[in-house]
Image (spheres, rainbow, N blue to C red):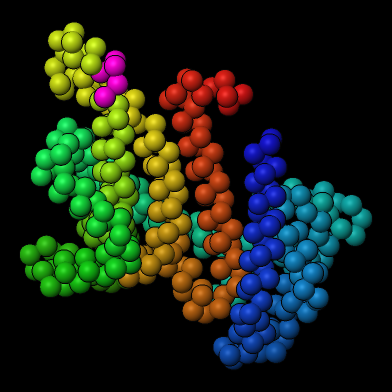
Amino acid sequence: MKRLGFFLAVMMGLLAIVFSLFQALPSADQLLTGQRSDAATTQAIVADLGLDQPLHTQFLLYANDLSPISVYSNQADKTAYLSGIAIPMGSVSLWLKWPYLRKSFVNQQPVARLLLEALLGTAVLALSAMVIALLLGVPMGVLAALKKGTWIDHALTASSALGISVPSFFSAMVISWLFGFVYSQQTGLSMTGSLYELDSLGESLHLRLDHLILPAIALGIRPLAVFVQLTRNTLVDVLSQDYVRLARAKGLTEAQVVWRHALPNALNPLVTSIGGWFSSLLAGSFFTEYIFQWKGLGKVTIDALQQSDLPVIMGAVLFTACVFFLMHSLTERLYVWMDPRLRGQDK
């Protein structure tokens, strides 16, 4: 309950900041006028969103839409898009519902539907990048720790430092151009593409896992580099502990000492880093998705920014904040489960 209260307070503060900052974007009437919408349609949308009201009233109306417990007039047009239970109370109704993120200015589709459709692409991309980072990063970190002070250790440490320093969008551009264009005949990969694509006749969708390879590698480079250094530094410290010396004195092989005794005790910081990086990949894959034209939350958000589609932008920001909170909470639970010493502190 404490975490839930903290989350609600953070969300309200974030909502107030985002709502104020995005007032600099063109309003709905300006946007629709630019799209040659008729005056009646423009006026209806402005009235429905309360954009003709003072700023503080607009904020309260938006907060009412987001709240799981809301009050609406029985004549309100937006009730057709609400998903929940209505309790009539005279001329108004009390709604117990899912948060309503309103409709896109551009295509008039519910924002929640647009974000949920894009979430699959982002989740698959982030999970693939994390798997690549873990499968390569942890063994490389173990190798660097076991070869401490040798040229292998120096090479892996220097490479990981370079991987951390290079921004993801730069890696994405280089990888897309190099392996999707210059050497496309050898790799068989393309510069752009999504998880699902229409066939040549435009009738059915086909799964294209080959389109996942390049963006997943580009997005996974930085967490891979972090996991190498984190695993290496933590394992070097663990290998110097007394219980590791005792395990070696008992005659256990080096593989048994490392994989059964040392590495499990070096995983706690890695688990924390995995949770943070996974939420960052979910929220921070914007430019990678845009460069590869991968259909996900990032591409949807950037397209909305270019079109000044305020409901989609605000919905994406708030949705990203929820993802961060959920991943952070799950990481804390997993951390406590892995380390029994923290359970008393957690209570």
Q: Nearer the viewer, residue 163 or 104?
A: 163
Is residue 75 shown above or below 164?
below
Q: How many marks?
A: 0
Q: Where on the picture, by quarter, is residue 32?
A: bottom right
Picture coordinates of residue 251, whole percent (x, y)? 14, 10
Q: Residue at x 75, y 66 (%)?
A: 59
- Looking at the image, which residue sits at the far left? 186
In the foreground, 251 or 36: 251
**Relative horizontal placement of residue 103, taking residue 213 as reference (left or right):** right
Viewer-closest of 246 and 174? 246
Residue 98, position as x, y percentages in the image: 66, 51
Q: Splitting the image into 4 quarters, where does residue 257 fall?
A: top left
The magenta segment is 240-244
- Determine the residue positioned at 56% across, 68% down: 313
Q: Quadrant of residue 314?
A: bottom right
Which residue ends up furthest to the right in the rendered image?
90
Residue at the (16%, 69%) spot, across then down: 178
Relative to the observer, which residue lies in front, 335 or 42?
335
Q: From the image, which quarter does the C terminus lie in?
A: top right
Q: Answer whether residue 190 is visible to the viewer in this image.
A: no
**What secondary structure prevails in the magenta region?**
helix
Q: Is residue 212 above or below residue 333?
A: below
Q: Quadrant of the N terminus?
A: top right
Q: Position of residue 150 (x, y in %)?
A: 11, 40
